[in-house]
Image: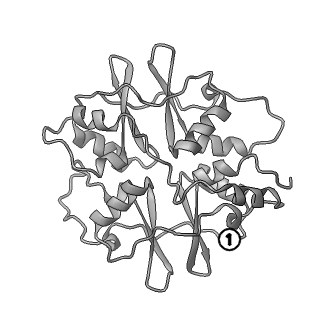
Amino acid sequence: MTDRVISVRPDTPAERARALLVERRFSALPVVDGHNHLVGVLDAADLVRLDHTPRGLPPHTVGGLMRRGVVCMSPESDIGVLTHRLRTYGEPQMMPIVEHGFLVGVITRADLLRPRPRDGKLGRLARRAANLLKGGGTAGRPRPPAAARKLNRTGTLHARDIMTSADLVTVTENTPPDHAARLLVGNRFTALPVVDVAGRLVGLVSEADLIDDPLNGRRTPRPRSVAAAMTTDVITRPPDAPVVELAQVLSDGGLRLVPIVAGDRLVGVVSRGDVLRAHGIPHSP
């Protein structure tokens, strides 16, 4: 099992953690002490929330922002139990794998969408996944310098200024779940907008929606299309929504992706990563 998991320590500056999350498109980082013992997890939502606290606060470190008492599992744990936890509890997107108190890997929802080891244990899956702490719903690529310069000249930032709008990856209600899963894994997304032939938003399908839960106590047939798995009660915002409002929705609402709509047409998406990248861009108070 690889020991090259990217982690941070409690004394790591928050800005350094932010850079890791943005550059590598992660949704969370394990936090370890000097002996590689797991002591917490820092989620992108923690930094999004920090960005919109009153200015003038002292510099923050990971230790003051991280979530403690993290649920973790061992390399020999049953995959069915892990799947149930990541499928049922919406906020955690990755599960730290710990052996004798030491962090040895992570398993993400994206990993669970791939074929599983036949023995039903986490060992071989963890060996593949330990360095794959996947992105936090960023439905786009880092902005080029020209776009950054354009944002630097704006006043108050709005959704249209930071959203991904070009080359949007979407699916339709008739898309097979396996194809949607490949798009999620291949693009390192956590959710995809579902649109009709006219480009109208009709739902959102996430990694969790596509993961079979072996412990739910029900024998339900595997969905044949995205329509049977997607969420239709989707929180959206218009292009002129202030970034501070988007940050609140993403952090307090436990969301990783907010579709941006003009009327009922999808025109872009904003993720936690987009909001993190927007931090530090000059804007009006």
Residue 13 found in image quarter: top right
- The residue located at (69%, 55%) in the rendering is 145
Look at mark 1 in the image and give the residue it sits on: 239
Residue at the bottom extreme of this rendering? 198
Q: Is residue 100 above or below residue 147?
A: above
Where disc 1 sits, the SS reads loop
Disc 1 marks a residue whose amino acid type is Pro
Q: Is residue 171 left or right of residue 248?
A: left
Q: Give neighbour class at mark 1: few <14, some 14-19, many 20+ (Cα, 10 Å).
A: many
- The residue located at (47%, 46%) in the rendering is 91
The residue lying toward the viewer, choosing from 17 and 240, is 17
Residue at the top extreme of this rendering? 35
Residue 64 found in image quarter: top right
Residue 79 found in image quarter: top left
Residue at the right extreme of this rendering? 285
Rendered location of residue 74, percent (x, y) = 29, 27
In this picture the colour scheme is one colour
The residue lying toward the viewer, choosing from 182 and 39, is 182
- The residue located at (86%, 52%) in the rendering is 285
Q: Is residue 178 left or right of residue 86?
A: left
Rendered location of residue 237, percent (x, y) = 63, 68
Quadrant placement of the N terminus: top left
Q: Is residue 110 above or below residue 98?
A: below
Rendered location of residue 104, percent (x, y) = 36, 25
Residue 84 visible in this rendered orientation of the protein: yes
Residue 207 visible in this rendered orientation of the protein: no
Rendered location of residue 168, percent (x, y) = 51, 69
